Amino acid sequence: MADPMKIRANMVGDKVEVKVLMSHEMETGQRKDAKGATIPAWFIQNVTATHNGKTVLSAEWGPAVAKNPFLSFRFAGGKPGDKVAITWTDNKGDKRTDEATIAA
Amino acid sequence: MRRIVPAIFMAAAAAAFAQQSNTVQEIEKYRAALGDGNPAELWEARGEAIWKEKRGPKNASLEQCDLGLGAGVVKGAYTVLPKYFKDSDKVEDLESRLVTCMVTLQGFTPEQAKKDPFGGPGKKVAMDALVAYITAESRGMKMSVAATHPKEIEAYELGRKMFFFRGGPHDFACATCHGVDNQRIRLQDLPNLTKQEDARKAYTSWPAYRVSQGEVRSFQWRLYDCFRQQRFPELEFVSPASIALTMYLAKNSNGGTFNAPSIKR
């Protein structure tokens, strides 16, 4: 089971700024271990963000994204107290969803 | 014709200097950009959970651990470490104190508590996370290491000696790199740790998330790796030597504002 994400959501003007830290190895599949064997690829493939259940961001990621990724984005239409949920799914099918409340 | 040569040389040197300080500025920009989403926060969150989790043969949490400001006080504790503890009759830094608490409160053997000092690829360890959590609780506070107890003074003096002690195949001392102004390794500026300003800046920036390693590195790791780079014998985790050197560097940073876990390249 993956570690929880760290999500912050704040109002910036009339937009909501969301900052997310995810805990993930993000192995590219290009690296070799000490014995010379390829380390299998293991990375987040899909990221979706929902605001009160409605998708506000959806992304397809690849192995070029660094370990422990940081994602920051803004969307319109949110207000303090609303819920923002982030979900990622990796190429091994592992999945994690975390939620945060928008601060004023 | 001869006269022109030094002038050209000086111009070239000035250009090289300008380029170098420009590079330093660019690195500062890179750090600022990274600082917003420091993955060390993931370690801090994990460390808080481990601090409160019932673990070990005694099925106890670390919440009653005395880190220097009384049992269970985490806020600001890192600013007074290393310090002398009556119960263990030793000068301890944060990591060794955690080992002590894992033994006394949770019932681990010292070997078990010290087994995994540093994380690595695919290996998450409790120690890194605990260190990240506890040090983060001292962010923004001033360093105030007492170093007044006879054993604390002894550790400080031993640490100072070690800092200037030359040895190993390279005939190196810590002071070889860290006792002179404006030294660099590649593009990394090396702080002159004999000067208060530099000592404060350096000590208060550890532990740190190292982007190149994808790990949070503790101060014990920093010293361990400095020893490796000097080709010294391996610095044993939470050994009296490592604590003495930490004591010397921590006391020299007194008055500096603690600002870690930070992020480094």
Image (cartoon, rainbow, N blue to C red):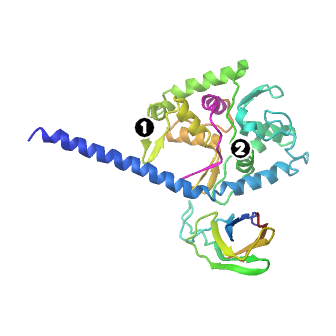
In the image, is residue B146 part of the stretch drawn in magenta? no
Quarter-of-image position of residue B255: top right
Question: At x 72% / y 38%, what residue is drawn?
Answer: B78
Disc sitting over residue B56 in the figure: none
Q: Nearer the viewer, residue A9 or B173?
A: A9
Residue A55 vertical placement versus B252 (above, below): below
The magenta region covers B241-265
Badge 1 density bin: few <14, some 14–19, many ≥20, Cα 10 Å: few
Question: At x 64% / y 70%, what residue is drawn?
Answer: A73
Which residue sits furthest top? B150
Callout 2: chain: B
Residue B41 drawn at (x, y percent)? 70, 55
Quarter-of-image position of residue B220: top right
From the viewer's perspective, is A3 left or right of A68? right
Q: Nearer the viewer, residue B95 or B203?
A: B203
Helix, strand or loop status at disc 2: helix
From the viewer's perspective, is A20 left or right of B164? right
Q: Nearer the viewer, residue B83 or B6?
A: B6
Disc sitting over residue B182 in the figure: 1
Q: Which residue is mark 2?
A: B135
Residue A27 drawn at (x, y percent)? 60, 68
Which residue sits furthest front? A13
Q: Are marks 1 and 2 in contact (CB under 8 Å)?
A: no
Q: Nearer the viewer, residue B176 or B254?
A: B254
From where the camera sits, is residue B234 visible? no
Question: At x 60% / y 29%, what residue is drawn?
Answer: B252
From the viewer's perspective, is A37 left or right of B134? left
Distance between the alpha carbons at the discs numbered 1 and 2: 28 Å
In the image, is residue B251 part of the stretch drawn in magenta? yes
From the viewer's perspective, is B80 left or right of B59? left
